[in-house]
Amino acid sequence: MKHIKHCSVIAALAAAALTFAGVAPAALAANDGATQDAVVATRSFPKTNAVKKNILAEASSTQVESDSDWGGVESLNVPQTKSQAEKDADAAAAAAEQQRQQQAQAQAQAQAASRSAARSDLSSSGSFTVTPPDGASVSSLLTFANQFVGKVPYVSGGNTPSGWDCSGFVQYVYGQMGVSLPHYSGAQATVGRAVGSLADAQPGDIIANAQHAAIYVGNGMVINSQLNGTRYDPIAWVFPSSYSIRRIF
């Protein structure tokens, strides 16, 4: 009897197992179908914009602030080179300038020595005192020349305060002013700048011809050395013929 009960129980369990096995796949299939019908997969991604860039332009471009100071070509310290011809020309110009300066210095020294010698002659004469000119101006020249009036005799061929002729007097006075003149009246008629007429003459001008030379002092008068010594004379007296008027200052 017990054996029959056991078989019944086993049979009941097997039937239940079969029933469950049949129902479960169907339920699972139904669930899968329901799931497939009910679940919708949606995905949301942020919108992106593709930007095309000019890589070459960006690689070569540079941003510079408006107040930046990067200097310019003129601020570059680039060594300057000269051609051999330019170097030779510069050297020649420098040598010429040096020679000119040496000549000017030598001339100034010679003039200073000449004035010093003349002043020594004045001192050694002992007959009168002469004040050297104080500048290269007409007034200084006339003041200096006036000191010899009535004091220096006429000596043919002379050109010192011990005695002089007409051109020697003019030569000496201008020499003390730093102007070198020839000792001959005809040559003195060609020095300096020409003046057209006596109406245009100014004090300090030289009036000369082949026979005589003098210094114009104004108002138709000259200071000169003639047979009666150093004195003032009217132009008409000492220049009865034509003459030249020459301007130094």
Image (tube, helix red, strand yellow):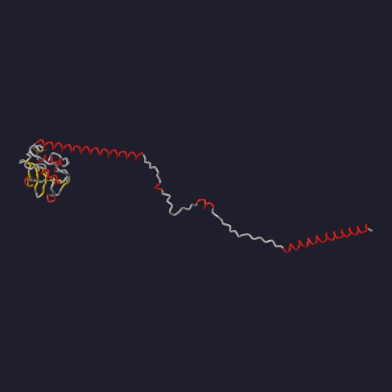
Quarter of the view holding residue 124: top left
Return the residue nearer the eye: 166 or 138: 138
Q: Residue furthest right?
A: 1
Q: Residue at x 75, y 63 (%)?
A: 34
Q: Residue furthest front?
A: 2
Residue 216 rendering spot, x and y as whole percentages: 11, 46
Q: Residue at x 64, y 61 (%)?
A: 44
Return the residue nearer the eye: 221 or 32: 32
Q: Residue furthest left?
A: 228
| Number of disc labels | 0
Return the residue nearer the eye: 78 or 239: 78
Residue 209 rendering spot, x and y as whole percentages: 11, 43
On screen, residue 149 above or below 62: above
Quarter of the view holding residue 186: top left
Q: Residue at x 27, y 38 (%)?
A: 98
Q: Is residue 121 left or right of residue 6?
A: left
Q: Residue at x 54, y 52 (%)?
A: 55
Return the residue nearer the eye: 207 or 137: 137
Residue 163 rendering spot, x and y as whole percentages: 8, 38
Q: Which quadrant of the figure contains the N terminus?
A: bottom right
Residue 50 rendering spot, x and y as whole percentages: 58, 57
On screen, residue 177 above or below 9: above
Q: Residue furthest top?
A: 124
